[in-house]
Image (spheres, coloured by chain):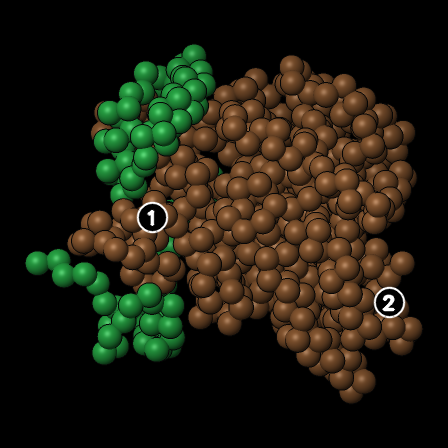
Chain colours: A green, B brown
Amino acid sequence: MITKKDVEYVAALARLEFSEDEKEELTKTLGDILEYAKKLSDVDTSSVQPTAHILPVNNVFREDRVEPSLGRDRVLENAPDKSKGCFRVPRVI
Amino acid sequence: MIHYLTAHRLAEMMGKGEISAREVVGLHLERIEELDQHLGAYITVEKDRALASAREADEKRRRGEKLSPLSGIPMALKDNICTEGIPTTCASKILENFIPPYSADVYERLQRAGCVLIGKANLDEFAMGSSTENSAFKITRNPWDEKRVPGGSSGGSAAAVAAGMAVFALGSDTGGSIRQPSAMCGVVGMKPTYGRVSRYGLVAFASSLDQIGPITRDVRDCALVLNHICGHDRRDSTSVDVEVPDFEKGLEQGIKGMRIGIPSEYFGEGIDRGVKERVQEAIKVLENLGAVCDEVSLPHTEYALPAYYIISSAEASSNLARYDGIRYGRRAEGYSDLVDMFVRTRSDGFGREVKRRIMLGTYALSSGYYDAYYKKAQQVRTLIKEDFDRVFEGCDIIVGPTTPTVAFRAGEKTDDPLQMYLSDVYTIPVNIAGLPALSVPCGFSEGLPVGLQFIGKPFAESTLLRAAYAYEQSTGFHKMHPQAKEASRDEI
């Protein structure tokens, strides 16, 4: 039900790459898990609302007030590459 | 033995001047030095910092300051809980060098209570797993039998408490990750109601399911720790603004007349005989204490596991998209352009199970499959929640096994993800419904601890604690501890 091609397609979406062996393993294990998940189709849910979240909470608002946040140096502390107070990334354009 | 004392007992002793925080912390550090190279419960041990906070706690006591009962008590935090200035790795290569610039709400609260952070505990990478074997750094051994896993994903936290290397620990529970390892290591573990404890600073796995909770040596300690970690936090929009009771109050009220539901679905295929027998004996104990136990049905139980793996993996695939090698975490080398940098960073930085879940979640959310998997799983989630609602109309709590088996052997399930997932079959429905639940030790099978699970109505942690306390006090399994066997070390 899931093919190596599916695995390659989903990997591209998830920004992951796999060796040929890994692709084979994933085709099998994802296939097993999805086969197991098919069990869900036994349940009649035609008139059931989906639950995304268990709490009866919708939007949580607060005043739009400026408050102290982390300084730039602290934010950049963990960056693998930085320059002049910015995150540095490979050229995009 | 000091290292097996509870927080409330130690607080009493420190109050009377029989022992200092410095001594308590020092003894636990010695214990870690002696045992942990082998047990592997900790990723980071904060020796100097712990001794300094212990001295501070003693100093405050000398000055006569008002102290919380947890002052000077050494604790472990699961290494997916952010601690400012202390590495927080999630047991992943991708966060190996990450030092958070801020602390989780729970850590701030426990610091205010005077707790001493002794170390950061091992886990399955990003809390994805049931055996702590998915850690990128080390495996954790079960202190009761070192050839067995401690359960997971909070396996380091549970093993540390069980082996006397921390008085209590915090774990996180997305599908059973506090209760399952607590059961397998013979300690008390609770997942509070979703929204009870702030998730601010907990590295996200599946945001609609994750919840932080205590792992302790007895039920009273569980109540004490809960007293200090609950409460509204506006930095987590799912944190609920409800009153936090004193969870210690009412512990001793007993359970005469309490109505307990026993779900028949939790005793079906897949449960070990020894586990089943211990749990049935425990139900007898609860009846002798005056509870009224009746069989109930949670008919959608068998669908909880597949629904969980779709929902949690979908949320994980979205949450883990942030690991891009730009703002924090590891960046791979040798890339040709931006997309190649993402791909190499993520493929190299994440372990096998994490990648499998990202793939599963991405697939379930992808165009053409969304309705069949993700929406379907969310609809089944509604039905599972309604099962619990219905049962709770007729009873106060639900009692059953925490896990279908005792701790399994290391390596036994690593190549079969489905078998591994099945070890969470009784804990997962609780996360799906957002309910509170805790596991207490209820005896042994094959010489290994068995856990008894108490499940409650939303925000009814006090009722759960009262029932668990009554059970614990009449049995005493919480007073049994593993032998740290010098001899067995050579065998492995």
x%, y% of residue B345?
Answer: 32, 52
Q: In the figure, is residue B79 to the left or right of B71? A: left
Secondary structure of the residue carrying tag 1 is helix
The reply to whether callout 2 and callout 1 are in contact (CB within 8 Å) is no
- Residue extending furthest top? A42
Question: Residue A17 has which mark?
Answer: none
Residue, x 38% and y 72% (percent of image)? A77
Label 2 crowd (10 A; few <14 / some 14-19 / many >=20) = some
Dot 1 amino acid type:
Arg
* The quadrant where residue B291 appears: top right
Answer yes or no: is residue B464 visible: no
Residue, x 86% and y 40% (percent of image)? B477
**Distance between the Cα atoms at labels 2 and 1?**
49 Å
* The quadrant where residue A3 appears: top left
The residue labelled by disc 1 is B346
Q: In the figure, is residue B90 to the left or right of B464? A: left
Q: Do marks 2 and 1 share a chain? A: yes
Label 1 crowd (10 A; few <14 / some 14-19 / many >=20) = many
Answer yes or no: is residue B112 visible: yes
The residue labelled by disc 2 is B12
x%, y% of residue B375?
Answer: 34, 28
Image mark 1: chain: B
From this view, report whether residue B395 is shown above or below residue B184.
above
In the rendered image, which quarter contains the N terminus of chain A? top left
In the rendered image, which quarter contains the C terminus of chain A? bottom left
Residue, x 67% and y 32% (percent of image)? B409
Secondary structure of the residue carrying tag 2 is helix
Q: Earlier in the sequence, mark 2 or mark 1?
A: 2
Dot 2 amino acid type:
Glu
